[in-house]
Image (cartoon, coloured by chain):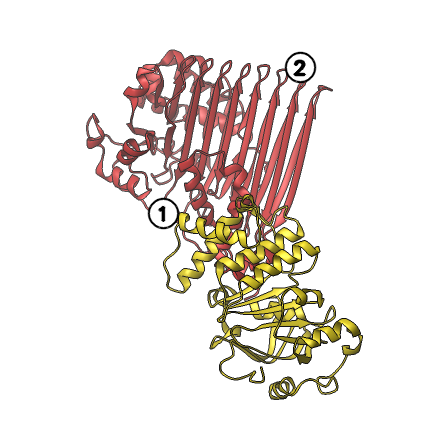
Amino acid sequence: MSSAEQFKELAEKKYAYGFVTDIEEDRVPKGLSEEIIRLISQKKGEPQFMLDWRLKAYRHWLTMEEPTWANVRYNRIDYQDIVYYSAPKPRKQLGSMDEVDPELKRAFAKLGIPLEEQMRLAGVAVDAVFDSVSVATTFKKKLADLGIVFCSFSEAVREHPALVERWLGSVVPSTDNYFAALNSAVFSDGSFAYVPKGVRCPMELSTYFRINAKDTGQFERTLIVADEGAYVSYLEGCTAPMRDENQLHAAVVELVALDGAHIKYSTVQNWYPGDAEGKGGIYNFVTKRGKAMARAKISWTQVETGSAITWKYPSCILQGDGSVGEFYSVALTNHRQQADTGTKMIHVGKNTRSTIISKGISAGKGQNTYRGLVKMLKGATGARNYSQCDSLLIGDTCGAHTFPYIEVRNPTAQVAHEATTSKISEDQLFYCLQRGISQEDAVSMIVNGFAKQVLKELPMEFAVEAQKLLGMSLEGSVG
Amino acid sequence: MANEGTPRALLEVHGLRAGIEGKEILKGVDLAIRPGEVHAIMGPNGSGKSTLAGVLAGREVFRVTAGRATFDGKDLLALAPESRAAAGLFLGFQYPVEIPGVGNLYFLRTALNAVRRARGEEPLDAMDFLSLAKEKMKLVELDPAFGSRSVNEGFSGGEKKRNEVFQMAVLEPKLAILDEIDSGLDIDALRVVARGVNALRRADRAVLLVTHYQRLLEYIPADRIHVMAAGRIVRSGGPELAEELERTGYAWVDGMKPEVAGAPRAAVATAREGR
């Protein structure tokens, strides 16, 4: 078989997590208006400040235009054709895991997320978000003993309104951009974590997101605050069921790392990417940003294999002197997936440092764009950045694009940028084949080798999962 | 040695024609190698030596247009490259490719277990593999540090060639085709590589050396020498043929037909059968 044929074949692996769970739902009517927002806020029993905040965001959103600068193509989204709130109806008050809807539990099991197992074996506290409402929060007591708050966003609004009011929107204002404003107006739930001064969170905090209800846009909001000298590692992973219509996902994640704090935020993203023709699939428009105060450190690590459209730039505002920002990313596009992803490193403080390692993998007719901004402001004396953007092409019908933007306003700042583009070569494949390794294993091995620099930044069990995911996402992409 | 072409041969090639993008490179190759033998194919650049090695290993850029090849009783040309490997055919590459980020030992264990699985054997676990690998690395004096480095990445020419022989030692093929295993090696590195190959000689294993230089044969003695020119084997003979080549160079073989070159009977006979 010729390599062209082989490469053409690289693309037939079905999405393994496509299933729909029947659960009674509590939904609001389609469409977006002040009324709908009031209804959402009311259903969630929110205090006045939250409603005001939502309405302010909504009014601003109305004045904004959907951005078109990203290197992605998709049909216009009809924002009035979306259901903005849907929650599984609680059958009764949930006191323990035993009371969780068995349907839900089965869904988690299919996803390979047995909650009890995770609690028992991995020591991971899982705040499971099923559609828009958190149904199970674990390990709370252990965390509470250390003064750590880890709960659903709704619960945080109820139980810790002062913390929420103080930090919500402090990194991503409600008016930040089109999708962030939309999220601010209608966000249904998400996660909240607060780690007090000097506390090192003893376990990885983890949330699994899942889109389930038909036509329901997902608008999660995550806020993580690490107080002075605190440390927290947060894992976010998700899979979504197979759907025919495109589904909008516009999340916002805000990280606040106060003086000397360290936040490590890891993502494995596997939203439904659409079929081989590009039908269906999730539109993923995410705003992720962290603010690092003096000597604080924020690390973003992401493995992006899913979604039809990815629009995502986890960023760091290096506000405090000596703060550090890191961005490690693997983005894989196959079939007709399009990804426009990268980071922004905004150096404000003196001697701030940032590292960007981006690995883009394109197969099939996938289009992969790295878009990154490194900005050294006037006060960023002695600031340094190192960026490395590598692209790997599989076959000759895909594309890789790199748009690095660099703005330096301080003469002592140093910026280094390296970029490479390579193809999985015939020679590499043949070398593997000649040693007895199958085509698929060879591609998976070469791709994982290419992504290794990033994968090693992930927590161990997550790295294993991500490695499997990369191989799986490319299965069939070489014949 | 006069029995080439008998069913006992491990590899039998008849009238093999192959090329790339419509250009014919191999113009009717005949070859028979029995278990335990070491053969060498020599010839000037562009004579088709490396193409022959590539075609036998199943490199897809080459199209086979005529002829046949039997390996260990199987129709070699019908097998996918990885199945040829599983059947016991090993190609030592002239230019081993780098695979960034893939650990050398991880790669080799994946290969060994793929081959074992294809043969219906149990895969080797990490510990057993490690002790096997350590032992075989000694054979070619490869520092254990090379185990955790990426496949061939940043290896010197000599290290790459030693790594090839190390892989051969672990994979234990029935036939090892070593393509210019001597190129780019200084004399010390050549000695190490040759010692490794010689140590792997066994009654049930054959070796086909592809080389430009007679020097290699001083370190790895061959039972049978074939001279290739313009896509054909134009002469075959014993070790003395290599010495003759060393004296006379390749100028005399250019463009020669097997009959004119006065090839030994056996080679001529098989060459005729093939046409």
Q: Is residue A48 left or right of residue B63?
A: left
- The residue nearer to you, when weighing A325 against B261, is B261
Q: Secondary structure at mark 2?
A: loop
Dot 2 amino acid type: Gly
The number of numbered discs placed on residues in the rendered structure image is: 2
- Per the rendering, the colour in which chain A appears is red
Indicate the secondary structure of the residue bearing disc 1.
loop
In-front residue for pair A452/B196:
B196
The N terminus of chain A - image quarter: bottom right
B8 left or right, relative to A404: left
- Residue at the (63%, 32%) spot, across then down: A387
Q: Amino acid at mark 1?
A: Gly
Chain for numbered disc 2: A
In the picture of the structure, the residue carrying the numbered disc 1 is A18
Name the quadrant containing residue A359.
Answer: top right
**Which residue is at the front of the view, B206 or A476?**
B206
Figure chain in yellow: B
- What residue is rendered at 44% in x and 58% in y? B114
Find out whether the residues at labels 1 and 2 contact each other: C-beta distance under 8 Å.
no
Q: Observer-nearest residue: A306 or B86?
A: B86
The CA distance from mark 1 to mark 2 is 50 Å
Indicate the position of residue A475 as horizontal and vertical percent values: 46, 53
Q: Which residue is mark 2?
A: A379
**Mark 1 or mark 2, earlier in chain:** 1
For the point 43% across and 56% down, which residue is it? Answer: B113
Where residue A265 sits: x, y (%)?
A: 46, 28
Check disc 1: other Cα within 10 Å, few if <14, some if 14-19, many if 20+: some
Query: Please, which chain is the residue tagged with disc 1 on?
Result: A
**Residue count near mark 2 (Cα–Cα under 10 Å), binned few <14, some 14–19, many ≥20:** some
Q: Reply above or below: A205 against A410.
A: below
